[in-house]
Image: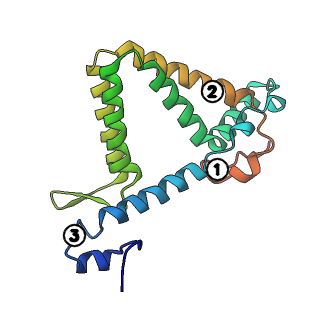
Amino acid sequence: MSKYGTIPTSSSSAAAGAPHLGGASPLDFISRAKARGATALATRRPWRELADVHAIGLPPSLGDAYLRVRANLAHFAMNYAIVVLVVVFLSLLWQPISLIVFLVCMVGWLVLYFLHDEPIVLFGRVVGDGVVLAVLAAVTLILLLLTGATTNILTSLLIGFVLVVVHAALHKAEDNVDEEVGRWYAPVPAQ
């Protein structure tokens, strides 16, 4: 029986003499990475919803602006992260060394934080996700700052942050508050 055109499973690749990489084949890792990427992007809201001009309006008070920011940060979290990353990426286009470092760090983030299935074990101890997140953030920031693009990076992060906060404050959050309660924050009781 021919196996041409079939997707090998971990048991068939082990039987065929393929190397066993930590309990999974490279094909399994790629499949899981694609599934996790699709799951992460599934939390992204439609860009039309984010850019809806009919949902823009000044909040009546500072307290309402705060509530809008909280609700919209939860509702559009993935979109806002993409916006900030695009702003940083665009600012690094004129700094090729920084751009290469940024892309290498991004691969590290994908492998060590976003796409890993099993906990990371270092010297026989399990490393928690919070520690991995803190170390990756610190290493990324230090490497980017060592490339000489400090003001460029800090300025682009500030611009991205301002864009996100201004949009979150101006976007009316009445439509998305109910579905986001409990996802990122506890609801604020009405007074």
Between circles 2 and 3, the one closer to the viewer is 3
Q: Position of residue 45 (x, y in %)?
A: 66, 44
Sequence-wise, which precedes: disc 1 or disc 3? Answer: 3
Secondary structure of the residue carrying tag 3 is loop
Query: In the drawing, what numbered circle is on residue 186?
Result: 1
- Local packing at callout 1 (Cα closer than 10 Å; few below 14, some 14-19, many 20+) is few
Between circles 1 and 3, the one closer to the viewer is 3
Q: Position of residue 133 (x, y in %)?
A: 36, 44
Amino acid carrying mark 3 in the image: His
Q: Which residue is mark 2?
A: 165
Q: Which residue is mark 3?
A: 20
Question: How many numbered callouts?
Answer: 3
The outermost residue toward the left is: 123
Asked if residue 78 shows in the view, the reply is: yes
Q: Identify the image quadrant of residue 26.
A: bottom left
Per the model, the C-alpha gap separating discs 2 and 3 is: 47 Å
